[in-house]
Amino acid sequence: MRVPLSWLREYVDVAAESTPEDVLAALVAVGFEEEDVHRFELSGPIVVGEVLEFVEEPQKNGKTIRWCQVDVGDGVRGIVCGAGNFFAGDKVVVTLPGSVLPGPFPIAARKTYGHVSDGMIASAKELGLGEESDGILRLVEIGIDAPAGTDAIGLLGLDDVAVEINVTPDRGYALSLRGVAREYSHATGAAFRDPAERDAADVCIDRHEFSVAVDDRAPIRGRVGATEFVARVVRDVDPTKPTPSWMIARLTLAGVRSLGILIDITNYVMLELGTPIHGYDLDALTGGITVRRATAGEKLQTLDGKLRDLDVEDLLITDESGPIGLAGVMGGGTTEMGASTRNVLVEAAVFEPITIARTARRHKLPSEASRRFERGVDPGLPYVAAQRVVDLMVELAGGTDERVGGAVGSDPVRTSIDLPSGFVAGLIGVEYSDDEIVASLEMIGCAVAATEQGWTVVAPTWRPDLTDTWTLAEEVARITGYDRIPSEVPVPPSGRGLTGAQRGRRRVSNALAAAGYVETPSFPFTTEEQNDLHGSASGEHLPSIRLANPLDGQAPFLRRSLVPGLVQVAHRNVSRGLTDLALYESGTVFLPRSGVVYGTPHVPPPAVRPSAATLAELDDAIPPQRRHVAVLLTGSLIAKQPGEPARAADLADALDAVRTVGLAAGVDIRVTQGTRAALHPGRTGTLDVRGETVGYVGELLPDVAAAADLPGRVVVAEVDLDLVLELAGDRVVVGSLSTYPAATQDVSLVVSADVPAADVASALREGAGELLEHLHLVDDYRGAGIEHGRKSLTFAMRFRAADRTLTAAEATEAKLAGVTMAGRRHGAVIRD
């Protein structure tokens, strides 16, 4: 919101010596954010000049210039001008040598067209008073007649300055000079003069001769689209009358361009009071006005010239011919005020905020009006705002007020709020006296009455954000000063902090980073095909969640696996020449259950605490979301170095990453032979913890890697981190260390080549019993000396007893028991 200071001073006492920075500081003290200071970027000498005479001189380039003699107060100056819209005797604005116009554009005496032009006659655009110009600014057109030599900067209001503040969505009342002036008064104690304070008799309609109706048959959330609608008629206006320079200057500083006297007046009142105003060419209307919802198939050409397809939720302003405006957003082109307008219908209304916000977003049509309506306007102002527009049209546009119009609506309902004594101090943490609380609330316009428990408070009509005790307490803190709130860091109760799952996730992430992996978070969006390929073991179709309005139309589904995102990141890096990659991501995957429809059938209204049943319904509308961790390796794990060849990343490295995850989480993750649709058969493992499957590891199929433009071998692993941490539990179990020495033995077993080594190891471990402390596969041999179709697996075994030193015979006995179990299950025999 831009606030011209000369305008602000009309409604609140701002000291003459106060700078824009002082005003901003005061507004910041009551909760606004400082944005900027805006000025007319020009400097003098810029004066009023009287054109005494001129000679028109045609030029070789086909242009005709005027060699003018202009009285500027201290003498007559010769000035060359290319415009032709002024006459001898006209008062104009002259920028003398040494002045600077917006741009910056310095003015100096210079020779042009055979003359020395001692200054320049300026247009309104050159002075910064508008974006368009039909030629030289003739002061008679804006009702000014000042002696030659008068300072034009002050005369035209170009010495004014505006401060800009950021207005939060809950404080829509501050999108007006009225609201900002009141807040400045709160900050400084300066006297406030309410521009909306008028007697009811001054703003009433004497003759209700214009038909107005509200027919909302499909209100959103049961709220009628228009609660008040006031129409006033002004006759015999002159749309060609100039907008006064002071109004143009204020509108310009406020960020609104001048569009003619009639529209300028409606914009001026909107900025002044905060109530959007719309004006119609009364003679272009057919019958009365009805406010209703659109019907299917209706269209409307808005003021910006676009023909818009209307939605059945759109609230319309209509007459007997059909739609003539999008209520609270933008008017229609058929009833626009223009150069031929002689009679005006002024509209001041209160529209329902959600309806206006949805319409503005649906049509991508934000406007100054919708910006205010969607935040809530003062329901007590329509009559006052309409009368203010009427008065200005009578004063500045020569209109006639016959006090004719029409209106619907009723007085706004103001509910009371019970504020218990002690509540404010308990919430804010500051001891406020009763007098401070009452004075603060009354200062912002509340009606306060004492009760046995505290106070009953009725908020003013311009503060729809004051709805409960918490918002009242915030107002007390704001008015009395945020600097009174102590800056104390709360001490958390002992024993709290990160949860066990949070600590576990951090350990896993830190361990992978320490192992040389780079974390690459990615968007959780993918395609249905990628979900089927990487989200299932066999590639079958699985349910996926489709977004209603995805960021990328080619990837509209939420991911079931982290691998597609890692593959995409790897592709992007490889395309940039980074071919040796070790990536990981810890993130959420979305696993909807088959046959369950997810979504939110009913959106609860804002600013109302949902019931337990509503919260349960919302929870049921969310698919299960599990946190996974995944790794991807491609290229060389060890780069080529002098004396050492490069070593490509392979499946063993992915298995190491899985072991790193298991150690950080506090579980033993075991690997067995498995299959995945996207992974190479024979180079795929299923990961389990205590018999529960927690993930997979393997090498991408060459076709899958090639489809992502990834050269060479690509290995991946993905683990359900939530499940792993659940299986690990919150407690860390530490076994006692035996002081007795270990007995180590190796065994080589020959088995069929299609028997997984993990199955053989499991049988050895089970058969050897509790004396076996550690078992590790050290060799897988298939070659000379081994029968075709068979393989030799060598395991290193470590035995230890907790209460004694094992003998070699005891260790051998345990080893042979394991061999017997492996032979019984898998036909394993000891290699000769």
Image (spheres, rainbow, N blue to C red):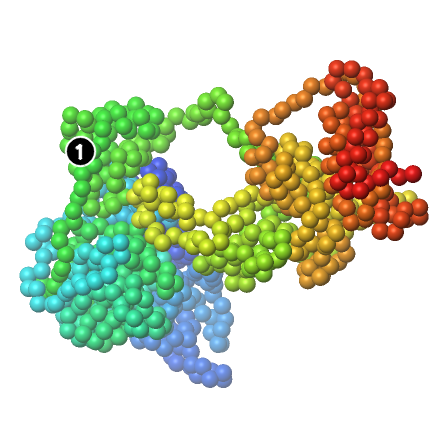
> 493 or 62, which is in the foreground?
493
> Secondary structure under badge 1?
strand
Residue 573 falls left or right of residue 817: left
Q: Quadrant of residue 356?
A: bottom left
Per the image, the residue denoted by label 1 is: 456
Name, please, the residue furthest toward the right. Answer: 784
Compared with residue 762, is residue 100 higher up or lower down, i.e. above or below? below
Q: Quadrant of residue 227?
A: bottom left
Q: Residue at x 51, y 56 (%)?
A: 543
Residue 513 falls left or right of residue 3: right
> 289 or 796, which is in the foreground?
796
Q: Residue at x 81, y 19 (%)?
A: 806
Residue 817 falls left or right of residue 327: right
Compared with residue 26, is residue 730 higher up or lower down, i.e. above or below? above
Compared with residue 717, is residue 188 higher up or lower down, i.e. above or below? above
Q: Residue at x 55, y 30 (%)?
A: 500
> 104 or 339, which is in the foreground?
339
Residue 476 appearing in the image: yes
Q: Position of residue 61 (x, y in %)?
A: 49, 83
Residue 813 falls left or right of residue 167: right
